[in-house]
Amino acid sequence: MRIPESELIINQDGSIYHLNLKPEDIAQTIILVGDPDRVEMVASFFDAIELKKHKREFYTVTGTYKGQRLTVLSTGIGTDNIDIVINELDALVNVDFTTREPKSELSKLNLVRIGTSGGLQAEIEPGSYLVTASSVGFDGMLNYYKDIVDITNSKFEKEFTEYVNWNKRLATPYLVDGSAKFLKLFHGEKYLQGITISSNGFYGPQGRIVRLQTADGELNDKIHSFEFEGRKITNYEMESSALLGLSKMLGHDAATICLIIANRITKKAVSDYHPMMEQLVKDVLDKLS
């Protein structure tokens, strides 16, 4: 099936529309970060740099670390940007740009997001590493895709929405699991595993009040006490639900690993988390290599 020019935009130089990348520009294993400035920090660990490309908030560096080819790419903030990034990365490896048709043999990418997050259980100390075993999508983005019914947990949907008395004006939350391969790799005393909420905003959608009141001032208290099959919701961030969901639909392995920089329950926070983030990046790179 040929993909029309309006549906997959390829730039005149043969690169894909938003990311400005060509198929040969990316490695099989890709580190995703939100902040474009963090790309340089991750790439500073590389032994050699092969390529740098920058367009909008999407900054890409490809190089080698301990002999393995890796790419680091900034996504910006939010699941809407993840929708762009994952679809375009998949097209780079699984669509023939000459014929504009999906390839007969599909490639699997390894996609690992490294970010920051806020803890939602008192025992999760700032400075902890938290791996998303499952992600709750508050964003609604995956609801636009038919295959969502094959990768999400309807039992969770029902129990969660009933427990918190979910506002029907909002998108229905969904639950998607992370890659079993990465959950096995990032496991042990150093790496906590939990259920992560991906919110579609930083302030009201995560229960923060500056001047505007939230629609449900008790939502975070209800989230804090909710349990699903013996597991509690552990943290907030803004990308993992789309990353895990789209990757699962497209056949890629994906993980989100966050440095907890604040605890929303105890109100503790790390004053300078940058050295901790550098250590997390180094640990992740070592495991991936």
Image (tube, helix red, strand yellow):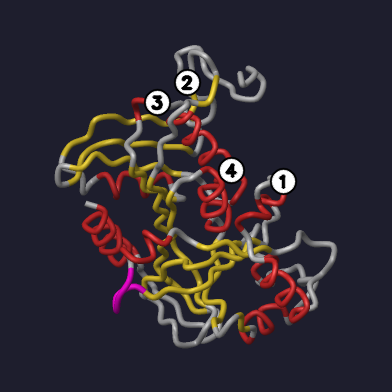
Is disc 3 placed on a helix, strand or loop?
Answer: helix
Q: Which residue is mark 4?
A: 83
The percent coordinates of residue 86 (x first, y second) are 51, 41
Residue drawn 40% across the image and 77% down it = 126
129 left or right of 228 in image: left
Q: Which mark is residue 96?
A: 2
The percent coordinates of residue 277 (x first, y second) are 32, 62
Is residue 135 found inside the magenta-colored segment of the image? Answer: no
Cα gap from disc 1 to disc 3, whole angstroms: 26 Å
The percent coordinates of residue 163 (x first, y second) are 74, 81
Q: Earlier in the sequence, mark 1 or mark 3?
A: 3
Is disc 2 placed on a helix, strand or loop?
Answer: strand
Q: Are marks 1 and 2 in contact (CB under 8 Å)?
A: no
The vertical placement of 225 against 129, above or below, is below
Q: Earlier in the sequence, mark 3 or mark 4?
A: 3
Q: Which residue is mark 3?
A: 23
Q: Earlier in the sequence, mark 4 or mark 2?
A: 4
Which three-letter amino acid code belongs to the residue tagged 1?
Answer: Tyr
Which three-letter amino acid code belongs to the residue tagged 3?
Answer: Pro
Q: Are marks 3 and 4 in contact (CB under 8 Å)?
A: no
